[in-house]
Image (cartoon, helix red, strand yellow):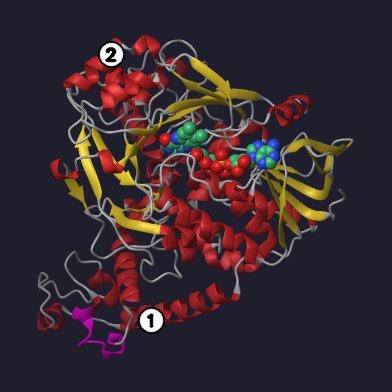
Amino acid sequence: MKHQGYDVVVIGGGHAGADAAHAAARTGAKTALVTMRESDIGVMSCNPAIGGLGKGHLVREIDALDGVMGRVADRAGIQFRLLNRRKGPAVQGPRAQADRALYRTHMLAEIKSQPNLDIVLGEVVDLEMQSARVTGVSLADGSVVAAKAVVLTTGTFLRGVIHIGDERRSGGRMGDRASERLASRIDDLGLPLGRLKTGTPPRLDGRTIDWTRLESQPGDDDPVLFSFLSDSPRARQVACGITHTNARTHEIITENLHRSAMYGGHINGVGPRYCPSIEDKVVRFAEKESHQIFLEPEGLDTHIIYPNGISTSLPVDVQAEYVRTIVGLEAVEIEQPGYAIEYDYVDPRALDLRLAVGACDGLFLAGQINGTTGYEEAAAQGLVAGLNAAASAMGRDPVTFSRADSYIGVMVDDLTTRGVSEPYRMFTSRAEFRLSLRADNADQRLTPKGIEVGCVGAERRETFGRKMESLNAARDVLEALSLTPKDLKALGIEVNADGTRRTGSQVLAFADVDVAQLEPAAPALQNLAPRIRQQLKYDAIYANYIERQREDVAVLRREEATAIPTGFDFSALDGLSNELKTKLDAARPNNLAQAGRIDGMTPAALTLILSRLRHDA
Ligand code: FAD
């Protein structure tokens, strides 16, 4: 069969693939999304949730650039919670639990309704090449799809091996074939490959859970959604259950550790430290008597429950035994066993800031194949690769992101300069500019860039334009205010009678002041929408800190050459995570610049090291 030619072909309809294909098509590139089955589009391989700390920021940024993940999650969300609600807005993370089926339905609808975007069903078995340039892909049925640029987003499918206890079989995830032939082609390209692993918990039959014995966790009363275009949840909202492992659970796991794929020596790949299996938790945190488990419904029309916190690769009989020691799960039936998967990834240092492969013109990689873990990290890379594949195919300028403008920029820079030693996951601590890279201002940071590169549609452009008009007018009003302590007292705001005049923005930065209190002094503020009021408040709170943040970052850059003496005791640094202590001890960097290049290093940790060096000097 002959397919038509495309500007961009995206291989894989997972999270990276969906946002890559949609982004390329939005900029006008004629795009094909090649995936094995239509039902693969938008599949959540592991937990039925989007967002969280750091990850929620990525989703907001994808949305600010008119990507799909945020609005699909809003439509499929059955419970919304803003994590870190009691902390400052810079580290708050929106999270939604999603109905798996709804997520897939809405993702497929987004892909199908996007102009310039076709779905082609088939397994890609090879890349078509002309000398060092990719010219398309060939499918298992012998057909060829020609393209000027190709984005590879095959997730855990490259030479994937599924492990349950000592049982092992080839597979991309449960129920799916691995991509073996494509993996051989990647070998031929000479790309540096590594092996990683990840795991998932058993899925439970909710009808066999005794919910009456469990604590219930509802969503937030005032749900915070992902998309700047969404108002309120569409789907019915549900609560989760909470339970805990106990001494008996840990005993069974410990007795059977030798039968676990992770611990029995069957898996060579490195696993995600941040998403440990229950075996990992029991061994690494042996002093803890119990671990929390969230029992999350996988959807509104299914009885399947996802027990968040007990991913495992123990044999099925052991899974059943330990799960039934847990309160509420005494009679639970397992619908699908937990398992671990080991797969190939490409060392992302082989890529540039466009996520393009240096050794092969026109080839881009995004998602788990680059050594990351998580739907959000995958989708954000998909967006970058999709935009750049389209730019390359259409002869336009590259679209790159910086550490100062986005978490997307932080992630791509981390991956392409430091590489990964374990599956990479986003955290707010990875960003040196985290006070300015907030989830609430992702649109102000990125929508103008999206408009410039042509990936933002009319609805968002207009909504954003109206918001900025209102926000800028209100900022002008606040800046024009000049309030004495006496004026403030009249407004019910107490300050020292120091005679200082303050602008409205300065007053708004005070802890307990909100826009409503300033209205008598500036009636123009009266009709502002709640979202604008909140934005003004956040911007005012952070204005002072952002200047200090800039100075801190400048100091770190200036001090990069500062030597770290041999024998420097990293373990004596309070506030440094155990993970970083171990990595620093192993790497023994000679100076701050070298320390900064260690995978997982954070700006806060570098500042800690610098202040100890200064103290010791
Ligand atoms: P995927 O979502 O895997 O999508 C890959 C797509 O490529 C699929 O649609 C597949 O059909 C398609 N494809 C593959 N090969 C071909 C081919 N040759 N031709 C055509 N199409 C092809 N993340 C976490 O954050 N926490 C966890 O605890 C966690 N646990 C996980 C456990 C398991 C068992 C698995 C499988 C994944 C887990 N993940 C976890 C990872 C999460 O699922 C991924 O990070 C995310 O799905 C990656 O998105 P992606 O788009 O890169 O790949």
Q: Is residue 517 magenta?
A: yes
Image position of 539 with respect to 520: above or below: above
Q: Nearer the viewer, residue 563 or 307?
A: 307
Quadrant of res 536? bottom left
Q: Residue at 30% across / 55% down in the picture?
A: 82
Q: Quadrant of ligand 1?
A: top right
The residue labelled by disc 1 is 476
Q: Secondary structure at mark 2?
A: helix
Q: Residue at 26% across / 65% down in the picture?
A: 222
Image location of residue 144, percent across then percent down: 84, 44
Image location of residue 378, percent across then percent down: 54, 44
Residues rendered magenta in the picture = 516-526
Q: Nearer the viewer, residue 12 or 345?
A: 12
Q: Nearer the viewer, residue 119 or 464?
A: 119
Instruction: Find out if the beta carbon at label 2 lies less than 8 Å from the nearest ligand 1 atom.
Output: no
Q: Quadrant of the C terminus?
A: top left
Quadrant of res 418? top right
Image location of residue 200, percent across then percent down: 42, 32
Looking at the rendered image, the disc whose residue lies closer to the viewer, 1 or 2, is: 2
Instruction: Find out if the beta carbon at label 1 lies less than 8 Å from the nearest ligand 1 atom.
Output: no
The residue labelled by disc 2 is 254
Horizontally, is 284 left or right of 419 in the view? left
Q: Is residue 506 magenta?
A: no
Image location of residue 5, percent across then percent down: 84, 54
Q: Residue at 85% across / 36% down in the picture?
A: 132
The amino acid beneath tag 2 is: Thr
Horizontally, is 310 left or right of 127 in the view? left
